[in-house]
Amino acid sequence: MHNDKKITVVLPAYNAVQTLEQTVKDLPRPLVDEIILVDDASRDGTADLARRLDLVVFEHPANRGYGGNQKTCYREALARGADIIVMVHPDYQYDPKLVKHLAAFIADDYFDVMLGTRIHSRRETLAGGMPRYKYLFNRLLTLGENLASGYNLSEWHTGLRAYKRAVLESIPWEKNSDDFVFDSQMLFQIAARHYRIGEISVPTRYFPAASAINLRRSLKYGLGTVAAALKYLFGAYR
């Protein structure tokens, strides 16, 4: 709780049993009022572990994809009265301790949306394990998205994000893709409504247990992001 705001962390989970406990342990309690985990038909006991950790758990009977998982996360967080919703990947790729900073910027009304950016220098980002091809795609796609939207964000592709309740209530995220391009579509919807977007730097952490998409899916994601930028330019998100 910060400034009488209910802070809810949502964890879109898929086969996260190796990293979930450490992720939850590092969340800044008691600042976080509630933790919701949505299990996207994992095969490794993620949901059972989440219950043992006393999280609020929702399970998909079949895999709905990364975007489909987030849709359930936000739907349930809003239904349970969240004022600030922070998405944290339960694969421990993003430092959960930083939730307190993301939430505070929104609770204190500096921004409506907060992003944790992994891009502060090429050396640090690559040293953190980001593959070179992903770094290149990230830079090129972010440049195009900034040009299309008029924003100047250092990264459009982070998975550490926080939203004011009013943002999620006003944008039509239910219409977005169930795949990874959901994140880019969300930011274009936010940009179209001129919400204030802030950023803080976060460490880059790639390691074997952290989830990652392969080159083929990265290419599909990149093409989807380009399509989203073109849709924005032609007014589809307004």
Image: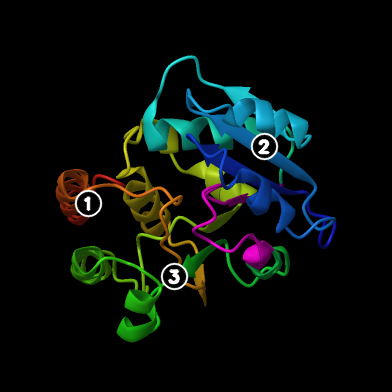
Q: Disc 1 designates what residue?
A: 225
Residue 4, percent from left and from top: 85, 56
Could you say which is closer to the camera, residue 132 or residue 68?
132
Image position of 182 (left or right of 19): left
Residue 22, percent from left and from top: 66, 52
Establish if 165 lies above or below 146.
above
Q: Amino acid at mark 1?
A: Thr
Q: How many marks?
A: 3
Select label 1 or label 2 by which is in front.
2
Q: Amino acid at mark 3?
A: Thr
The crowding category of the residue bearing disc 3, from other C-alpha atoms within 10 Å (few below 14, some 14 to 19, many at least 20), is many
Q: Residue at x 47, y 34 (%)?
A: 14
The crowding category of the residue bearing disc 1, from other C-alpha atoms within 10 Å (few below 14, some 14 to 19, many at least 20), is many
Establish if 32 lies above or below 217.
below
Select label 3 or label 1 by which is in front.
3
Dot 1 lies on which element? helix
Q: Residue furthest top?
A: 61
Is mark 3 in CB contact (under 8 Å) with mark 1? no
Select label 2 or label 3 by which is in front.
3
**Disc nearer the start of the sequence (2/3):** 2
Residue 175, percent from left and from top: 36, 32
Q: Disc 3 designates what residue?
A: 204
Image position of 97 (left or right of 123): right
Dot 3 lies on which element? loop
The disc placed on residue 36 is 2
Q: Which residues are magenta?
A: 83-99
Q: Amino acid at mark 2?
A: Ile
**Disc nearer the start of the sequence (3/1):** 3
Is mark 1 in CB contact (under 8 Å) with mark 2? no
- What is the distance, in whole Å, between disc 3 and disc 1 at their CAs? 22 Å
Q: Residue at x 27, y 70 (%)?
A: 146
